[in-house]
Image (tube, rainbow, N blue to C red):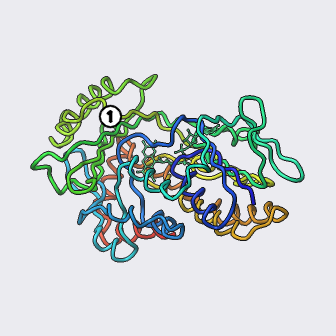
């Protein structure tokens, strides 16, 4: 069957590999001039790794397991609020990994023959009819397919075309600053795999090891007006976090501005009514863009890719719409639950005032065993 994949992000390349390996004739269209993924590190959770396993793509990625005994939430000075036992969670459900985005993308796209990929191809719209779908770029047809998978990311043009009544994206009013650096000597190991929250400002700082010798950090704070450039955002964060655990400002200061990324956070304003319509399906952020707070965006895209590959295995052109409806029925409830959970987590960690004081009091009372069980449940596919 001829399948066109639109968008070569993490979700698009994983699905393209899966569909190619099951014998479909895949074409991957990407608007950028080359296939690549920019920016710092990314966590792949155990559920995402299981999906990559199903696609035969997990082997290289598994080498990047997070080595940390404990994780969870701490206050801005680094004092524990909610402690999770990562060793136990890993024994029960598997280990998350933290890997450079570029490395992950390289590893996922490696099995894809280059002749299947067409870069510098911005897909403008899809024209479905009773026998297939015509793909339009720069005002003219560039491909004809039995099925099209839209993996064109958070700002998906195709989502807007397929669901014109949907309210699209919602800005959360927060910004994320992230950076990666070589691990300086003497970094406090207790803070690794933790997120520090500040009930005074509602800001958050997270710190994760990447391999043996790098660290990935990220902040989440209120976005005032338009997003600042990396230099200005770094200055703002140093000032906001001046009296936090000293490691926080030391790491932000030690990271060159060129290695810092600033993102205004957005997510879908409401769940989509379907991930499939006729011969077209949505995948990854195009289907379920969520706040990054649970580190599940890419893992959910990998679950989509694995499910899509399974549902389209052996499919004939006449069969596509029915198979894609099964994909929708499997994936939409879970991905939408994750989207809601990520929004809840974002609200929880950004609370201020009395609500945040109450939050901290309750979190301190939660036994580590219960917190660990909840984490494992989240990572359960
Ligand atoms: C700050 C931040 C931190 C995050 N941290 C994590 C994390 O730790 N773990 C995690 O799992 N997730 C994380 N995420 C989410 C994760 O990055 C995304 O969920 C994931 O990258 C989505 O992949 P995708 O393939 O769906 O979309 P994308 O990666 O956005 O790929 C879309 C691709 O489509 C192309 N494209 C777009 N429009 C067109 C078009 N019209 N025609 C052709 N090509 C097009 C784009 O150029 C791009 O290559 C984070 C997100 C943010 C913002």
The outermost residue toward the bottom is 92
Q: Secondary structure at mark 1?
A: strand
Give the camera-side residue of 124 and 88. 124
Give the camera-side residue of 281 and 346. 281
Residue 18 visible in the snapshot? yes
The outermost residue toward the left is 186
Q: Which residue is mark 1?
A: 260
- Which quadrant, please, contains the N terminus? bottom right
Q: Quadrant of residue 236?
A: top left
Q: Is residue 212 left or right of residue 168?
A: left
Residue at screen point 37% across, 65% down: 62
The answer to whether the residue bearing label 1 lies less than 8 angstroms from the nearest atom of ligand 1 is no
Residue 163 visible in the snapshot? no
Indicate whether 368 appears above or below 264: below
Q: Quadrant of residue 372?
A: bottom left
Residue at screen point 58% across, 43% down: 153
Indicate whether 260 appears above or below 84: above
The mark total stands at: 1
Residue at screen point 30% across, 54% down: 73
Give the camera-side residue of 97 and 168. 97
Mark 1 surroundings within 10 Å by alpha-carbon count, few (fewer than 14), some (14 through 19), many (20 or more): many
Give the camera-side residue of 34 and 334. 34
Q: Position of residue 7 (x, y in %)?
A: 60, 44
Q: Position of residue 256 (x, y in %)?
A: 24, 32
Q: Position of residue 96 (x, y in %)?
A: 37, 63
Residue at screen point 29% across, 44% down: 217
Indicate whether 371 appears above or below 301: below
The outermost residue toward the front is 115
Q: Position of residue 45 (x, y in %)?
A: 42, 61
């Amino acid at each position: 069957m001829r399948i066109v994949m639109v968008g070569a992000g993490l979700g698009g390349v994983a699905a393209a590999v899966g569909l190619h390996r099951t014998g479909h004739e895949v074409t991957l269209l990407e608007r950028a001039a080359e296939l690549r993924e920019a920016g710092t590190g990314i966590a792949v959770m155990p559920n995402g790794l299981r999906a990559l396993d199903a696609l035969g793509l997990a082997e290289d990625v598994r080498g990047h397991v997070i080595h940390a005994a404990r994780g969870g939430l701490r206050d801005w000075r680094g004092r524990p609020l909610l402690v999770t036992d990562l060793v136990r969670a890993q024994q029960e459900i598997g280990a998350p990994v933290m890997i450079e985005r570029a490395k992950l993308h390289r590893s996922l796209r490696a099995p894809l023959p280059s002749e299947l990929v067409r870069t510098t191809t911005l897909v403008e719209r899809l024209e479905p009819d009773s026998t297939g779908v015509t793909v339009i770029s720069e005002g003219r047809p560039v491909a004809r397919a039995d099925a099209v998978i839209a993996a064109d990311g958070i700002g998906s043009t195709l989502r807007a075309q397929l669901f014109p009544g949907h309210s699209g994206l919602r800005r959360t009013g927060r910004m994320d600053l992230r950076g990666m650096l070589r691990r300086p000597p003497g970094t406090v190991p207790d803070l690794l795999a933790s997120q520090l929250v500040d009930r005074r400002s509602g800001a958050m700082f997270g710190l994760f090891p990447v391999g043996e010798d790098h660290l990935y950090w990220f902040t989440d704070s209120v976005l005032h007006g338009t997003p600042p450039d990396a230099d200005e955002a770094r200055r703002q964060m140093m000032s906001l976090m001046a009296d936090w655990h000293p490691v926080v400002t030391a790491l932000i200061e030690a990271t060159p501005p060129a290695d810092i990324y600033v993102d205004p956070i957005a997510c879908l304003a409401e769940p989509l009514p379907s991930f499939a319509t006729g011969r077209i399906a949505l995948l990854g952020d195009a289907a379920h863009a969520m706040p990054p707070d649970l580190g599940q965006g890419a893992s959910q895209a990998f679950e989509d890719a694995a499910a899509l590959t399974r549902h389209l295995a052996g499919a004939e052109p006449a069969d596509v719409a029915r198979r894609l409806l099964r994909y929708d029925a499997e994936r939409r409830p879970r991905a939408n639950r994750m989207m809601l959970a990520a929004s809840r987590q974002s609200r929880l960690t950004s609370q201020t005032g009395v609500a945040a004081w109450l939050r901290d009091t309750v979190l301190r009372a939660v036994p580590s065993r219960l917190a660990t069980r909840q984490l494992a449940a989240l990572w359960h596919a």
